Image (tube, rainbow, N blue to C red):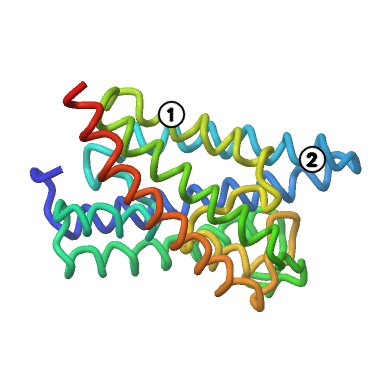
């Protein structure tokens, strides 16, 4: 990653987050178009998301680290592997890229460029689900880096694929993606009124995952 200058890394973060959001939103629109079966629609939304994560992390990871997620950027900034100023630019690039991904998905399906979602996602169970989703994602990344760095793209893709199904919120686990999805009144959307609570839950899960990583895996190193 050090071989690439900051503009290239920011472009990779924006591009990766944009493609991720376009996949989430676009596959959700396609799913609703093709089937009225709720379970099948969720599966149609899940598989492309997990698959694109494997691709994006593999091809863009060597450039920027493939965060595509402010929560992940927070982890690496806290570990002092990313300067605070660079982390701020990473987060901005992720948010801008995510919004662009929503616009791209809408353009492909002839929808308004931006359309605030009316899908209400709120309440204690959903907030807990988001905290657990973010916790698991951070723990997966930290453990993968510690034990199987080359497998991280697959670990993250498989984790998100699973978390779509075992969390009540379908695992947003990403503040930038949450913001972008609030701008799409489609299958993958979230009403803007629920965004801040989701992000708060995601950050709580992130901090808990960081705490576990700081304690658990150093102990494993000494085992």
**Which one is in front, 129 or 223?**
223
Please give the residue where the numbered disc 1 appears in the rendered image: 155
User: How far from the left and from the top, in percent, is residue 190?
Assistant: 68, 65
Point out the residue furthest to the bottom here: 193
Looking at the image, residue 132 sits to the left or right of residue 10; the answer is: right
* Label 1 Cα neighbours within 10 Å, binned few <14 / some 14-19 / many ≥20: many
Quadrant (top left/top right/bottom left/bottom right) for the C terminus: top left
- In the displayed structure, does residue 137 sit left or right of residue 61? right
The answer to whether the residue labelled 1 contacts the one labelled 2, judged by CB atoms less than 8 Å apart, is no
Residue located at (28% from left, 62% from top): 90
Comparing 149 with 102, the one in front is 149
- The residue drawn where x is 34% and y is 69% is 92
Residue that extends furthest to the left in the rendered view of this protein: 3
User: The N terminus is located in which quarter?
Assistant: top left
Rendered location of residue 192, percent (x, y) = 64, 76
The CA span between labels 1 and 2 is 23 Å
- Residue 17 x, y percent position in the rendering: 43, 53
Query: Residue 25 appears at what percent x and percent y?
Result: 64, 53
Q: Residue at x 62, y 62 (%)?
A: 127
**Up-down: is 206 above or below 35?**
below
Please say if 135 is above or below 124.
above
Residue at 81% from the left image edge and 34% from the top image edge: 40
Q: Earlier in the sequence, mark 1 or mark 2?
A: 2
Which residue is the site of mark 2?
41
Dot 2 falls on a residue whose secondary structure is helix
Using a 10 Å C-alpha cutoff, classify the residue at mark 2 as few (fewer than 14 neighbours), some (14 to 19) or many (20 or more).
many
């Amino acid at each position: 990653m050090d071989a690439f200058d900051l503009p290239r890394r920011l472009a990779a973060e924006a591009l990766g987050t944009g493609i991720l959001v376009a996949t989430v939103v676009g596959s959700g629109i396609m799913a609703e178009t093709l089937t009225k079966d709720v379970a099948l629609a969720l599966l149609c939304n899940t598989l492309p998301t997990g698959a694109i994560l494997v691709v994006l992390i593999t091809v863009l990871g060597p450039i920027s680290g493939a965060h595509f997620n402010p929560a992940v950027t927070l982890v690496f900034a806290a570990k002092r592997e990313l300067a605070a100023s660079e982390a701020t630019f990473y987060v901005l690039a992720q948010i801008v890229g995510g919004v662009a991904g929503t616009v791209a998905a809408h353009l492909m399906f002839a929808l308004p460029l931006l359309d605030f979602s009316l899908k209400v996602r709120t309440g204690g169970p959903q907030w807990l689900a988001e905290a657990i989703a973010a916790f698991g994602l951070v723990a997966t990344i930290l453990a993968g880096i510690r034990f199987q760095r080359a497998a991280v793209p697959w670990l993250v893709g498989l984790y998100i694929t699973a978390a779509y199904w075992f969390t009540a919120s379908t695992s947003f686990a990403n503040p930038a993606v949450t913001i972008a999805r609030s701008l799409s009144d489609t299958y993958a959307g979230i009403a803007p009124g629920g965004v801040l609570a989701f992000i708060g839950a995601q950050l709580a899960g992130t901090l808990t995952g960081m705490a576990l990583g700081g304690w658990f895996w150093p102990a494993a190193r000494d085992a």
